[in-house]
Image (tube, rainbow, N blue to C red):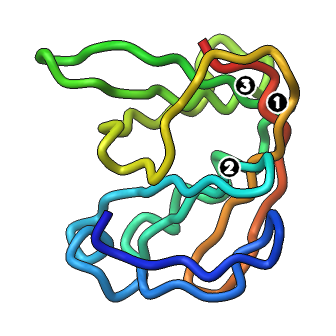
Amino acid sequence: MAYAVINDGMRIKQTCYWDSIHARHGLFAMSGNAGAWRLLVPDCQRGFLPEMATAHHVEIETGLWHDRPVATIWFDDLTRTPFRLLLDQHMFDRTLRPSTCRQPLLVYSRDGLQQEHMIHRIY
């Protein structure tokens, strides 16, 4: 990754992601630490925060898209059309591993922590 994160356990204390080339191009990023995942929302994508906020839980599905490793983050709001994000796995600073253990997903914007969700599984 082209940015640094200073952690405070599960929380992000500081990051230079917001001014990175990835953020300027509107790319979401995922950072993991202390058993939690943190979704970094670039400034130009903050309009999606209300869509994420309705989730009852989150699931992450890994796979390939055009022969590239990707992860789909499903914000399940118990409707037929949940909000989802497709991220290239190169935008993760840790390797995703299948899991049915519940893990926190903290959603951050430049303004700090915006939302807290629970990931029910990674598959």
Q: Earlier in the sequence, mark 2 or mark 1?
A: 2
Amino acid beneath label 3: Asp
What residue is disc 2 on?
37
**Residue 67 percent coordinates (x, y):** 13, 15
* Residue 41 image position (x, y, % from top left): 50, 65
Q: Give x and y (percent) for residue 59.
A: 68, 23
Mark 3 vs mark 2, CA separation in Å: 17 Å
Amino acid type of the residue that numbered disc 1 sits on in the rendered structure: His
* Of 84 and 72, the residue lying toward us: 72
- The residue at which mark 1 appears reads as 57
Instruction: Looking at the picture, tell me which residue is in the foreground, 80 or 21.
Output: 21
Report which quarter residue 45 is drawn in. bottom left
Residue at point 78%, 36% (across, down): 55
Q: Secondary structure at mark 3?
A: strand
Quarter of the image that includes the N terminus: bottom left
Q: CA distance from mark 1 to mark 3?
A: 6 Å
Q: Residues within 10 Å of mark 1 (few under 14, many from 20)?
A: many
Residue positioned 84% across, 55% down in the render? 116
Q: Is residue 32 left or right of residue 93?
A: right
Q: Which residue is mark 3?
A: 76
Position above or below: 19 against 58: below
Which quadrant holds the C terminus?
Answer: top right
Expressed as whole percent of the image width and height from the top left, the position of residue 2 reads 28, 71
Q: Mark 2 vs mark 1: give the one in front.
A: 2
Q: Measuring 37% from the left and 39% from the top, which residue is drawn there?
A: 87
Residues at circles 3 and 2 in contact by the CB criterion of under 8 Å: no
User: What's the residue type where badge 2 is placed?
Assistant: Trp
The reply to whether callout 1 and callout 3 are in contact (CB within 8 Å) is yes
